[in-house]
Amino acid sequence: MPVLITSDIHGSRDGILLLQKAVSVFRPEKIISAGDQCPVPGYEAFFSSMEMTRGNCDRFYEYDNLRFPPLSLSTEACGHRITVTHGDRMYEDDFNLAPGDIFITGHTHVPHLEVRNGIYFCNPGSSSRPRSSSGPTAALLSEEGISIFSLLSSEILDSLSF
């Protein structure tokens, strides 16, 4: 089962609806968010279903019944160790990354995939405030690799194979 990766939702109802559509299409086993969720009332169940980190804008929002996100998190999925942080305060050198690991950040609102020294780097872009010609994007992690896709069309825009 895939993992949906998102970042920089910024409380946008349109961005949330696009992500909910992606959840219904891809049926991920989990959702990982690299920060700046900025939750809004009415979508608590959606936000509570995520493993998320804190972005630079999250401190201005009420998380009410949701756990206030940490600056980073470590998890595993699809046979890989995954480290997630927003990308505004902590960087790859702040973690003990090894070949085969996946490092996920957000913050720039620009989707990006890269492999350096055997480490997979992923920025899923933004579902609500994209800063690239790709429009609203997210990423999917599977046993085969990582892909960036359009939240409008589900078209794969970039991918890396393991």
Image (spheres, helix red, strand yellow):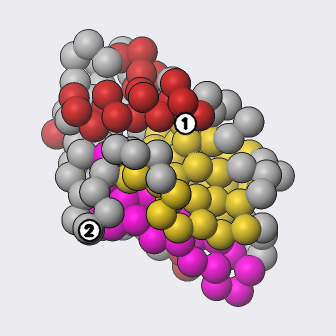
For label 1, the crowd category at 10 Å Cα-Cα, with few meaning under 14, some 14 to 19 and many 20 or more, is many
Residue that sits furthest to the right in the current view: 79
Q: Decide if residue 103 is in sight here.
A: no
Which quadrant of the view contains residue 80?
Answer: bottom right
Answer with mark 2 or mark 1, whichever residue precedes in sequence. 1
Image location (x, y in percent) of residue 13: 22, 29
What amino acid is at disc 2? Ser
Task: Give how far across and how far down residue 39 sits, in percent.
Answer: 27, 29
In the rendered image, residue 87, in percent from the top left (x then y), is placed at 39, 65
Over which residues does the magenta segment extend? 106-127
107 drawn magenta: yes
> Please, what secondary structure does the residue beneath circle 1 have?
strand
Q: Name the residue under label 1.
A: 31
Residue 135 sits above or below residue 5 on the image: below
Mark 2–mark 1 Cα distance, whole angstroms, equals 23 Å
From the viewer's perspective, is 72 left or right of 11? right
Q: Mark 2 points at which residue?
A: 132
Say whether residue 48 is left or right of residue 16. Answer: right
**How many residues crowd mark 2 within 10 Å: few (<14), some (14–19), many (20+)?**
some
Question: Residue at (77%, 76%) from the top-left corner?
Answer: 99
Seen at 68% across and 75% down, the residue is 119
Asked which secondary structure carries label 2, the reply is loop
Residue appearing at x 42%, y 29% in the figure: 21
From what the image shows, is residue 63 above or below residue 19? above
Asked if residue 159 lies in the magenta stretch, the reply is no
Q: Nearer the viewer, residue 134 or 48?
A: 134
